[in-house]
Image (cartoon, rainbow, N blue to C red):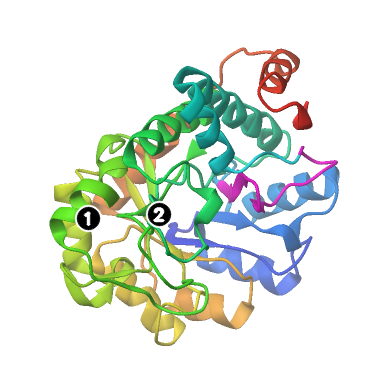
Amino acid sequence: MTESKSMILGCAGKSLTREEINFYRNECPWAFILFARNIGETEQIRDLVAEMRDCIGRPDALVFIDQEGGRVQRLRPPLAPNYPAGGALGALWRDDHDAGARAAWLMARLHAFDLLRYGITADCLPVLDVPIEGASDVIGARAYGKEPRPVIELGRAAAEGLMSGGVLPVMKHIPGHGRAFADTHFELPTVDASLSDLQRHDFAPFKELNHLPMAMTAHVVYSAIDPKNPATTSGKVIDEIIRREIGFDGLLMSDDTSMKALSGDFPTKAASILAAGCDLVLHCNGVFEEMAGIASRTTGLEGKSLERAKRALTYISKSDAAEETEIRAEFATYFDAVA
């Protein structure tokens, strides 16, 4: 079997083309990610996921998805209920801390039920960004709150809910996207806050939850740390802040390389991301030529990155014996619209 490369890739449609199959077999990405364009009906999703894994000869290969609730939710009815956004959980928490945390756990546990029935084993959740007033609404209602404490408590509950159901959580966007005044899908934001303010406000949830197995970087420049490079391609941010200050030694993936915040061609992006210290390069949009560019400069998963990858997989080794109907019924006492 070919050595896995340090990349996570998407695909163009609801089934793999012959070109994609041959490409995945030759390039062997470590994992895959699904988006709304890949989602049809139950058997189609299962077949696509199985086909992806078959291409690389790894039945345990992770398949990721963004299933947060609110506007960022790839599985929709009838495949999965529409769930509330993180901000709604935060509003519940402000009225009753225990109820908010319980609802966050329940919703994540329901995500695990929803995802595993299609073979999807990793969810890009929890969102640990702490927005400030006036920031871009690219995070907005996705955040649990505008102070670190609810973000920490609800983020922890969500991660534990996913893991109890056998799904790997990915905290995002480390070291914090909440001060960005631009949408990284379209441009690169620069945050000019002082290091002390970042430590107190933005880094706090990630530091508190640094034991979690996986995180996704922010395509954001922090001028107090590295005024030239966004976190994703900044060796200084990754080494000094993410690894040392925050203390995260889990598996670190980039945010999507097809977003406009990152400059350069795709081979350059891939090389810069890995050189900065990310373990994995993420490419989401399924454009074949772009994926080929990513693969051309992506190396095999080895050393500490391979160790982190193996360790991450142990977090999804088994799920608890919870009854789905009971979990749904309890969640409905908080949000009856998704009963």
- Position of the C terminus, as image quadrant, is top right
Residue in view at x 78 percent, y 61 percent: 15
Residue most toward the bottom? Answer: 264
Residue identified by numbered label 1: 198
Query: Can residue 167 be seen by looking at this rendering?
Result: no
Q: Is residue 86 magenta?
A: no
Residue 309 in the image: x percent, y percent? 37, 45
In the depicted view, which residue is nearer to us: 127 or 37? Answer: 127
In the depicted view, which residue is nearer to us: 230 or 65? Answer: 230
In the depicted view, which residue is nearer to us: 265 or 138? Answer: 138
Q: Is residue 173 left or right of residue 86?
A: left
Which numbered circle lies on residue 188?
none
The relative height of residue 104 versus residue 324 in the rendered view (above or below) is below
Residue 153 in the image: x percent, y percent? 39, 29
Residue in view at x 57 percent, y 55 percent: 32
Q: Is residue 134 left or right of residue 244?
A: right
Q: Quadrant of residue 225?
A: bottom left
Q: Quadrant of residue 255?
A: bottom left
Residue 61 in the image: x percent, y percent? 54, 46
Label 1 crowd bin: few (<14), some (14–19), many (20+), radius 10 Å: some
The relative height of residue 63 versus residue 121 in the rendered view (above or below) is below
Q: Is residue 69 magenta?
A: yes
Q: Is residue 51 left or right of residue 23?
A: right
Give the amino acid at mark 1. Leu
Give the amino acid at mark 2. Pro
Residue identified by numbered label 2: 131
Dot 1 or dot 2, earlier in sequence? 2
Magenta-colored span:
63-81
Residue in view at x 71 percent, y 69 percent: 12
Residue in view at x 45 percent, y 81 percent: 266
Q: Secondary structure at mark 2?
A: loop
